[in-house]
Image: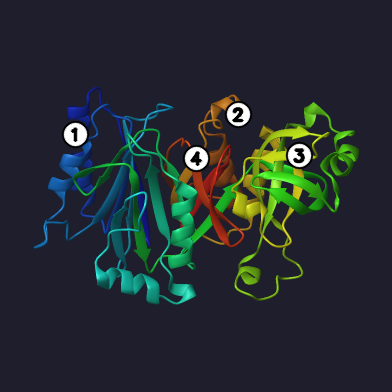
Amino acid sequence: MLLRSIACRAPTPAALGAEFAKKIAAAGAPDALLWLTDASDAAFVARPRTRAARPSARGRPAASSAAAASTTGRRGPRAARRRARARRRRGHAFHSPPDGLPDLPADAWAALAAAAPEDAPPLLLLAAPPRRTGFDIEGWLARMDAALPWSTKVGGIATESDLYLGGDALDGGVVGLALHGATLDAVVGQGATPVGPAFKVTACEGNVVRALDGSDVGAALDPVLADWNPMMGDLKIGVRVPTRAAADGGPARADAPDAYVVRQLLGMNREASALAIGAAPDLLAAEDVAIQLHAFGPQAAKRELEDAAARLTGGAGGLIVPCVGRGPALYGEADVESRALAAALGRELELAGFFANGEIGPVGARTFVHTFSTVVGLLR
């Protein structure tokens, strides 16, 4: 797979669109294209992209599939776009409304659903809430996990509602690329280290835990909290999720570490034996679910990303999606995580991405929307 990342800067959206078109023409028609912009009028970027691709009889580009998001938040280049180009590989670009599944031709869905686990195409996702309605993105991801359980899904939530499929402007939902014939290694850096033992959730109401290991939450957690030092970082809660094998009815590997998705600690009331966690109720109601206190901080975040990257075996580049609360806001300087990835892998990577309002990536057997995390998808 040949990957290339290109950044464009220009003083106005119109000039940006012209520069974007020039770079696409110079690079040649890609098989798949994912672009991001913080331009005030993203249509100026979408138009030249559409003109640069050859239209098919169905009115869509024959040479490339494209999905895009308009982002604001932290300012980087006026437009950054990433091209994934793969000989003998195919890319399906799609859009999904918030309450449905991707709008794909029947043959495309058949190819996705019939793919063997080792051939399941990875999905690069850009999500955005519509302007006038909400969007249960984790609910949408649960439907996608049920429909395409073997496809690894990574991406993020844009800071604005404008999405594009080809040259078509869309109001929220999800746009994405399904990359057939590619392999994607996902890294979800949650930046948190476990503190104290794990506790089995033995009673809960919605997202409020009422008992841990058969005891009141205060009796269970107070011995750990007594040794808590604010210098350790921000206090969060890890919720254990099943491994892929366990989710499919098989035994979890004995040497596999427990997988925890880190969530916000919303509050604790000892008298009422109540621990409120920012997690979906179905996650806490799962059989044999356990929680563990975690400490979040910059050193843990950087070390976790380096350790995860060191375990990867390849990858030419891909997508990096950090939370808006990371980057300079967490480390005090820019590019800390991209440099750490390059150092751990021993080479520079063709990376592009954006600071998101929620990061999409897998933990265990499930795809989640994360906060204060960095999600990396490396293609090979």
Which of these two is toward me, 28 or 154? 154
- The residue tagged 4 is 358
Q: Amino acid at mark 1?
A: Phe
- The residue tagged 2 is 330
Please tell me in which quadrant of the rendered image residue 6 appears. Answer: top left
279 sits to left or right of 377? right
Which of these two is toward me, 208 or 183? 208
Cα–Cα span, label 4 and label 2? 16 Å
Q: Amino acid at mark 3?
A: Ala
Cα–Cα span, label 2 and label 1? 33 Å
For label 2, the crowd category at 10 Å Cα-Cα, with few meaning under 14, some 14 to 19 and many 20 or more, is some
In x, y percent, where is residue 259? 68, 56
In x, y percent, where is residue 31? 26, 59
For label 4, the crowd category at 10 Å Cα-Cα, with few meaning under 14, some 14 to 19 and many 20 or more, is many
Question: Which mark is on residue 44?
Answer: 1
Q: Amino acid at mark 2?
A: Leu
Q: Residue at x 46, y 55 (%)?
A: 141
Specify which label sits upstream in the sequence, 1 or 4: 1
For label 3, the crowd category at 10 Å Cα-Cα, with few meaning under 14, some 14 to 19 and many 20 or more, is many
Give the number of the mark in front: 1 or 3.
Answer: 3
Cα–Cα span, label 1 and label 4? 26 Å
Q: Amino acid at mark 4?
A: Gly
> In this view of the protein, can residue 258 be seen by the observer?
yes
Q: Residue at x 70, y 74 (%)?
A: 251
Cα–Cα span, label 1 and label 3? 52 Å
Secondary structure of the residue carrying numbered label 4: loop
Asked if labels 2 and 4 touch by Cβ distance under 8 angstroms, the answer is no
Secondary structure of the residue carrying numbered label 1: helix
- The residue tagged 3 is 274
Work out which quarter of the rendered image holds the N terminus and state it: bottom left
